[in-house]
Amino acid sequence: MLGNGGCALLPDQDPLLIDVAGVEPLPGQDLEVRMAVTLRVQNPNDRDIDYNGVALRLEVNDRLLASGVSDRSGRVPRFSESLVVVPVSISAFSALRQALGLAQGQQIEQLPYTLHGKLSAGPFATQRFEASGTLDLRPRASSPDGRWLSEPQP
């Protein structure tokens, strides 16, 4: 979990803490795979944070796998947290590169990921962030919808 950014115009402003909370499959087109990446956004500040857009890039095994944007707006209350869902797309070519990597012996329960993104919170308060950990792409028996889970790295 890592939060970067902040605003020099807002003294004593701590960066937001952002983790990947989950990844779920979405319907896609013929040459793409779609996923919903759920982010847990924690606000350690004494004021609400309003946001009006999110952008993500997801790298798995040090290769770009997916990217996505959302124009969703919302608020992360002071000393609280919110879940933000961002749809991302994986091209057939990115998926093929990843599949070739997996064919070389990489286990699907320990895939290292790095998520780069930004949470737009106004013209001078955009929060950039990076999070990393491992993805477990095996469907969970306790999750009939096939939800994938992630484990952030400290």
Image (cartoon, grey):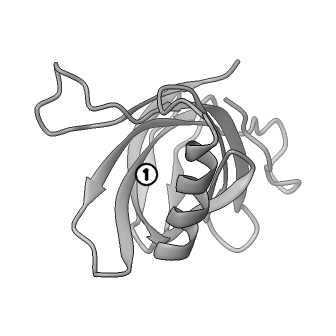
Residue in view at x 39 percent, y 68 percent: 72
Residue in view at x 35 percent, y 65 percent: 34
Residue in view at x 56 percent, y 45 percent: 103
How far from the left and from the top, in percent, is residue 21? 43, 34
The picture quadrant where one finds residue 16 is top right
Callout 1 amino acid:
Arg
Instruction: Give the SS element for disc 1.
Output: strand
* Quadrant in which the C terminus appears: top right
Q: Residue furthest right?
A: 8
**In the visual, does 45 lie left or right of 85?**
right
Compare residues 60 and 114 and report the one nearer the observer. Answer: 60
The picture quadrant where one finds residue 38 is top left
Q: Which residue is mark 1?
A: 75
Q: Is residue 122 above or below residue 110?
A: below
Compare residues 10 and 120 and report the one nearer the observer. Answer: 120
Q: Is residue 58 above or below residue 94?
A: above
Is disc 1 surrounded by few (<14), some (14 to 19) or many (20+) residues within 10 Å? Answer: some
* Quadrant in which the N terminus appears: top right
Compare residues 120 and 93 and report the one nearer the observer. Answer: 93
How far from the left and from the top, in percent, is residue 31? 37, 81
How far from the left and from the top, in percent, is residue 134? 58, 29
Q: Residue furthest left?
A: 144
The picture quadrant where one finds residue 14 is top right
Residue in view at x 47 percent, y 74 percent: 92
Residue 83 is at least partly visible in this image: yes
Q: Is residue 79 above or below residue 118?
A: above
